Amino acid sequence: MKILLTGVSGQLGHALQKQLAGAHTLITPTRAQMDLSQPWQIEDTIRSVRPDLIINPAAYTAVDLAESEPELALQINAVAPAVMAAEAKALGIGLIHYSTDYVFDGGKADADGNWLAYTEQDRTAPLNVYGETKLAGEQAIRASGCAHLIFRTSWVYSLHGKNFLLTMLKLASERDQLRVVDDQWGVPNSADWLASVSVEILAQAGAASSSPRWWQEFSGLYHLSASGRTNWCEFARSIMRNAEKLGLLQTAAPQITGIASSEYPTAARRPQNSLLNSACLQQRFNVLLPDWEQNLRRCLQKMQTQRPLQDVVN
Ligand SMILES: NC(=O)c1ccc[n+]([C@@H]2O[C@H](COP(=O)([O-])OP(=O)(O)OC[C@H]3O[C@@H](n4cnc5c(N)ncnc54)[C@H](OP(=O)(O)O)[C@@H]3O)[C@@H](O)[C@H]2O)c1
């Protein structure tokens, strides 16, 4: 299959590229070749490439900066996917796109105040510009009528790019005490795992051009997240515990203290509850949802062989 894959310099795009490369012909334009803030560049590329499928992990992901660059975030997160969807519809091909837990306001709880995981049917109400623009992207794709899979996920990390895992490992080599927010709950998801589930589902779809019935049946929006739950502070502690066990840290693990979000002000508000219920995806595509910590261990094990810590912290 000829696949147009965006954002390969990013965490998920990089993982998808690695996992799709052997079996498919990948067209992977860089920002210089196809700037997602320029709709005509997207149209031109798709019309000249004529792919069998578009996969769009690229996004404007600078959550705090988006508060001061709302137009640019909207162009990349909403207008660009809308253009891709219109082109996909015209070509009769599928579009795989990714979205975020930040489309919710984070208030879903039971009567006792315990956080409940969001389903695809829950009301969206983003708290920040990033979430608003990602939601607008979802809505544009769904309204276009193109064959699509939108996967909403949360707290993405990998050994590549910018993310919480690499930030914590870098800080571990610089400090002996860390203060991390402990009142925002969610599930960390490894880009490698997200890519592997996407590839597995794609295999079920078969060649996009020859499986319109599959797309008709399975097109839609799905929550895609590992199981379990944690908060940023516990995630940081787990990173240190597992990295130490694997002999990845060069110094003793720092002591980690939990703090309230109010003690760590940011430009963008973040939801307190980012939990996504992925039961629908699990049932429809028969995929396994491992515990988030199992995925973290797998990622850190890769660091032993693929990317030494010195590489990450320098
Ligand atoms: N990161 C998270 O915690 C998180 C959480 C929930 C959902 N998601 C969603 O998951 C998906 C993957 O996220 P990620 O963490 O892999 O993203 P990422 O690492 O920040 O990568 C973003 C990618 O988008 C590209 N991009 C940004 N602006 C562009 C433009 N104007 N033209 C062309 N390319 C552009 C970047 O290219 P450059 O290298 O040129 O900037 C990069 O390749 C996104 O849809 C995101 O919204 C992420």
Image: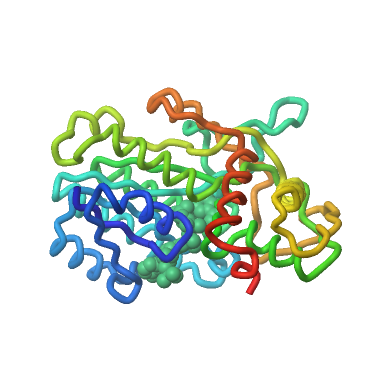
Residue 79 placement (x, y as % from top left): 34, 60
Residue 105 in view here: no
Which of the two residues, 78 or 159, is positioned nearer the viewer here? 159
Rendered residue at 75%/52% (across/down): 244
Residue 115 in view here: yes
Rendered residue at 33%/46% (across/down): 96
Considering the image in quadrants, where does the C terminus appear?
A: bottom right
Rendered residue at 48%/48% (across/down): 192
Q: In this view, does 282 lie above or below 244?
A: above
Q: Quadrant of residue 42?
A: bottom left
Q: In this view, does 24 lie above or below 32?
A: above
Residue 11 placement (x, y as % from top left): 48, 58
Which of the two residues, 163 or 26, is positioned nearer the viewer here? 26
Tag count: 0
Give the quarter the ligand 1 occupies: bottom left
Q: In this view, does 117 lie above or below 162?
A: above
Residue 9 placement (x, y as % from top left): 42, 66
Rendered residue at 67%/37% (across/down): 229
Q: Farthest top residue?
A: 283
Name the colour scheme: rainbow
Residue 103 placement (x, y as % from top left): 52, 47
Q: In which quarter of the image is residue 110?
A: top right
In this rendering, would 243 be left or right of 5?
Answer: right
Which of the two residues, 80 or 203, is positioned nearer the viewer here? 203
In this rendering, would 116 be left or right of 19?
Answer: right
